[in-house]
Image (cartoon, rainbow, N blue to C red):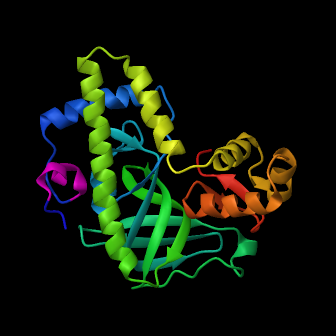
Amino acid sequence: MWGDESMMDESGAGFVRSEHETSAAGTSRDSAADRKVRNLVSVSVDQIRKLYDNESAQLFIHAQPVSMVTVVGMVESVNEQTTSSTFILKDETGPGVEVTFWTLEDKKSSNIPSIVENSYVRVFGQVRSKEGRVYVAAFRVIPITDYNEITLHHLEVIYDCKILEKAKLNIKASEASGFDQSKSNDIISTTSVSAGFSKADQLILETINKTPNPEGMSIQEICLAIRSLEVSIIKKRLEFLANEGHIYTTIDDDHYRSTDV
């Protein structure tokens, strides 16, 4: 599964990063502070635990900043409270990582999936740390019923790692040729946002990002703000964006908030 040596140092397979890798990551982190990256990357638990940089409060893979992650694993030691659930997520790459899933009290009895020990789930969220402890702040937890999805996730981790490695090499090549690094960073950031997005997706996401309301925007408000799109199209694209981890529901199933705010 992790036999490709070219990616082993960042794959979470236990390899120690070389000084050359660390130096490259530091260069990228300095420039990362000047831009806002928005992407969704498939990762392993070990990558989360080992590649998060506390100083910059950012997960880096191949010196590239990662905004949001999706990770698959088995649930251990669940602790459910009124407004949140905390559990340990573990996969085959090593010790588990803590996941915190915040919910609202009036949603606990609706369609929030129950988190059961020894079951497999897919988590969408952001990697954060508190007092040096790395954890995942989840905005979506989906029970896995088809175990082929576990194998698929392993392949996605390898693929995404290769994509980020290629982005890193492209940056190095642009630096060697004297290309403006800030423009290169903008290209990477834009590509990760718009890859696979339709114009409708981008328009909807931009609209939701603009709202200052903590509960996000209702479908009705989104439709009023984007009169150029039919209601049926907006609803379909909202479902797509939610499944991809770019937005999530808040006070009810009709209100959406961006994961980037």
In the rendered image, the residue lying farthest to the top is 178
- For the C terminus, the image quarter is top right
The foreground one among 74 and 193 is: 193
Residue 222 to residue 56: above or below: below
Give the magenta part as a residue range. 4-12
In the image, taking residue 4 as reference, residue 182 lies left or right, namely: right
Q: Residue at x 16, y 44 (%)?
A: 17
| Residue 11 magenta-highlighted | yes
> For residue 56, what is the image quadrant?
top left
Q: Residue at x 71, y 48 (%)?
A: 204
| Residue 79 magenta-highlighted | no
User: Is residue 62 visible in the rendered structure shown here?
Assistant: no
Q: How many marks?
A: 0
> For residue 63, what is the image quadrant?
top left
Residue 57 is situated, as x and y percent measured from the top left of the image, at 42, 41
> For residue 101, what is the image quadrant?
bottom right
In the image, taking residue 20 as reference, residue 49 lies left or right, namely: right
User: Is residue 144 visible in the rendered structure shown here?
Assistant: yes
The foreground one among 79 and 171 is: 171
Q: Residue at x 57, y 64 (%)?
A: 243
- For the N terminus, the image quarter is bottom left
Residue 175 is situated, as x and y percent measured from the top left of the image, at 28, 20
Residue 149 to residue 99: above or below: below
Main SS, magenta region, reads helix
